[in-house]
Amino acid sequence: MNLLSNKPFILVTGGTSGIGASTALHFADAGASVLALGLDAQGPHAPCHPRIQCLELDVCDSAQLKQTIAELPRLDALINAAGISRHEQEYQPEAFQQVLHINLTAVMQASMAAATHLLQSKGCIVNVASMYSYFGSKDRPAYSASKGGIVQLTRSLAQTWAEAGVRVNAVAPGWIATPLSEGLMADPDASASILSRTPMQRWGQASEVASVIGFLCSPAASFVNGAVIPVDGGYLTA
Ligand SMILES: NC(=O)c1ccc[n+]([C@@H]2O[C@H](COP(=O)([O-])OP(=O)(O)OC[C@H]3O[C@@H](n4cnc5c(N)ncnc54)[C@H](O)[C@@H]3O)[C@@H](O)[C@H]2O)c1
């Protein structure tokens, strides 16, 4: 990959689709080198850009995740975007644990593995929360628990490295058009109910989340730490 030592280096977990892929493109377009890791790294949703390398890596493989991050030449920002929902299956212990592992435990593991690099670069972390960080969900109890946990983990880690100049924030996307939400978008009842509560009356685009992540990583956000920013077209106001 075209890694220039004086250019920022960004790691995006879940960078192979949706919000993560859009975030990888956002940073690459701004001149950074990006490692986008996730599943289906050569698939149709993976970002294509000369400064983005897509890597097939399951974040549940903790040893591989740790080693991959340790071997990076430098790191200026870690974006934790990998996430799944198993819907009603989350009432089964195995699915509950899998969702918690991908959406929450792996975020902690990636953050700890990235800390050495970030302390050196005075970099930052941005996590991806959700509307389900605010609401419970009888349809996806593990997803909701994991996203509630992400908010508290963000606030905790925001304290951990603050004095050393490493900021940790989160975005809480509303209803964003991505492969993850395809099912909801295709369901006329579910989609109508979402749109009726969204003051802006439309689904968000992944790029609209990516640009807020970009802001949180920029010098413009130099005193923003431990914040969770909704990117939801006003959904939370209703
Ligand atoms: N789309 C929405 O409306 C919405 C709303 C709120 C929050 N989010 C959150 O945004 C993040 C991205 O979701 P999206 O909508 O872009 O979905 P998506 O399905 O398009 O992308 C999910 C990404 O996570 C990766 N991933 C899943 N399991 C993985 C694993 N075991 N190891 C490594 N990578 C794995 C996938 O490969 C993919 O790159 C998730 O954390 C999701 O919870 C999405």
Image (cartoon, grey):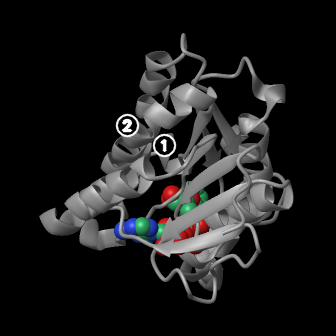
Q: Residue furthest front?
A: 5
Q: Are marks 1 and 2 in contact (CB under 8 Å)?
A: no
Considering the numbered disc 2 on the image, is that residue within a helix, a strand or a loop? helix
Displayed quadrant of residue 42: bottom right
Residue for point 57% across, 57% down: 12
Amino acid type shown at disc 2: Met
- Residue 83 position within the rendered picture, expressed as x and y whole percent measured from the top left: 45, 62
- Residue 196 position within the rendered picture, expressed as x and y whole percent measured from the top left: 74, 61
Residue for point 45% across, 32% down: 116
- Residue 128 position within the rendered picture, expressed as x and y whole percent measured from the top left: 55, 48
Residue for point 72% across, 37% down: 217
Please say if 11 is above or below 152. Answer: below
Displayed quadrant of residue 197: bottom right
Please say if 235 is above or below 164. Answer: below
Residue bearing the label numbered 2: 112
Amino acid type shown at disc 1: Ser
Displayed quadrant of residue 29: bottom right
Q: Residue furthest top?
A: 163
In-front residue for pair 63/171? 63
The residue at label 2 has a CB less than 8 Å from ligand 1: no
Residue bearing the label numbered 1: 133
In-front residue for pair 100/71? 71
Q: Is residue 89 left or right of residue 19?
A: left
Cα–Cα span, label 1 and label 2: 22 Å
